[in-house]
Amino acid sequence: MKRLQLVFLSVSTLIFTTTSALFAAPIGVPGATVGANKSDISAEANFLFDRDITGNAGGGTAEGTQAFAKGTVGLTDRVDLVVRLGFGDFKVKDQSPSTLNIDSGVGPAFGLGLKATWAQMPDANLKIGTVLQTTHLRSKDGDSRFGWTEYDAAIGAFLDSGSRSLRAGDAALIPYGGVVWSGLDINGAALEDKTFGIFVGVLARFAGNLHVGIELRVPDQTALGVEAGFSF
């Protein structure tokens, strides 16, 4: 158990010490995983390396970094509520001159989401679910204030073996993936160039309580998310 706690603390430290460059919250496991009347607390970092946007006179790119404390509450066995609170920054580089260019400082960020599992195949340990979420960041570049808002609607599947095949001290891997529609607004103006992408990831659970995860999103954006958490 001490070794698992060390892994959890190490990943949490990594998350909070590498947040200097993203924006776009990970989708996570596409379905409810917490359980009715149970909760989960995670440290989460999101790294947006590149996202194509539209500009007033042409296309550009966006990048950024976020760190979140994420809380998840199981409303039922099939529905989870997700709340994010944290901070982040972002950059927007428009390829056309004299249009939108932003290099923001660090500002507050928050997010809300729902996850629902609506189908399962018990013989294959496969579950299918949906994620609806939004994240918002407020920050300044000089004297100008900007708001970045992203909306995600995803559908996917995950392989949930639970703890039935585990011995004490083992890890359970939950691979997952799916498709996602994503919209992006900056100061209320829709700027996304591509709206559809895919996400793939894996969540590793240890001793029934601790977990760590990693996720990749492409091609609407190139983004990497990592998290470490504790369920209770």
Image (cartoon, rainbow, N blue to C red):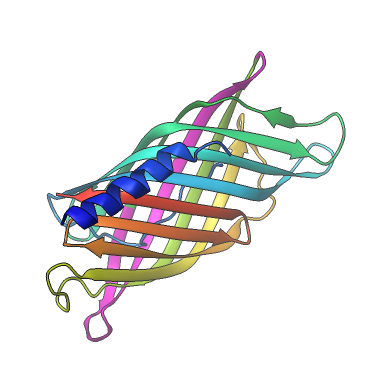
> At which x and y percent is residue 112?
37, 41
Please state, as top left, top right, bottom left or bottom right, where the N terminus lies in the image: bottom left
For the point 64% across and 42% down, which residue is it?
Answer: 63
> At which x and y percent is residue 168?
12, 69
For the point 14% across and 76% down, which residue is it?
Answer: 164
The verdict on residue 128 being magenta is yes
Tell me which segment is drawn in magenta: 115-143
Is 15 situated left or right of 70 in this image?
A: right
Q: Is residue 162 above or below residue 138?
A: below
Is 89 situated left or right of 45 in this image?
A: right
Q: Residue furthest bottom?
A: 123
For the point 56% across and 53% down, which residue is it?
Answer: 223
Q: Is residue 113 visible?
A: no
The verdict on residue 123 being magenta is yes
Q: Is residue 41 above or below residue 20?
A: below
For the point 58% across and 62% down, which residue is it?
Answer: 197
- Between residue 209 and residue 95, name the one nearer to us: 209
> At which x and y percent is residue 212?
33, 56
- Which image quadrant is residue 130 in? bottom left
